[in-house]
Amino acid sequence: MSNEDYAANKSLYETKYQIGYGLKYPDGHVIRVHRQILEYELELTKGKILDYGCGIGAHLHYFEENGFTPYGCDINAAAIEKCKSLLPAFAENFHVIPYIPRLRDYFSVDFDVIFSNQVLEYFNDHDLHNLLSQFHGMLKKGGVIFVTWIAPTNYYSKHIVGTHDGMREGAPEIRTVW
């Protein structure tokens, strides 16, 4: 993603978060992965979880209620402030990060689960490789990386008008690059 695209996306989401954007409840697929895979298949019922692109913390709140210690990061300061107010006992675990952070500058712990919900599709191949390598280096032995991605059949995919810097570019009315 170019610096120009990053600035535009960051500005757009800053405005959205200020007027109330963000999940109030966890997505159903997150609950299913937690219950069916983490809990039932892997018997992973507690530990440290990092939500990369945590927004206002709805998923972290769910995981905290189910035995996990939440950690999160997002490029959006307004979202992180809401996350801290939702989970005040863990406020020091949430950080505003730049587009491509050095995650160890923010998190000194290793994680049982690293999670990212519909965020990584915004990265070009080079930046995605960098980020996934960092995730791998922060994962405990036997840990899980759980990532969701917008599918090509998703509603927003029909608005793709081309590619830019190795990423899909949305039509002007969508105003995002992913």
Image: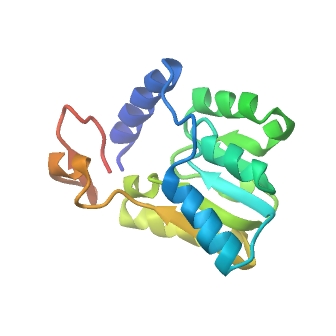
Can residue 14 be spotted in the picture?
A: yes
**Relative to residue 43, is residue 124 depicted above or below?**
above
Can residue 134 be spotted in the picture?
A: no
The residue depicted at 72 percent of the width and 41 percent of the height is 94
Residue 79 x %, y %: 59, 31
Name of the residue lying farthest toward the left: 161
**Relative to residue 50, is residue 81 depicted above or below?**
above
Residue 90 lies left or right of residue 41; in this view the side is right
**Relative to residue 157, is residue 78 depicted above or below?**
above
Residue 158 x %, y %: 16, 50
Residue 116 lies left or right of residue 107; in this view the side is left
The residue depicted at 74 percent of the width and 28 percent of the height is 85
Picture quarter containing residue 133?
A: bottom right
Residue 132 x %, y %: 54, 69
The residue depicted at 51 percent of the width and 22 percent of the height is 20
Tag count:
0
Picture quarter containing residue 36?
A: bottom right
Picture quarter containing residue 88?
A: top right
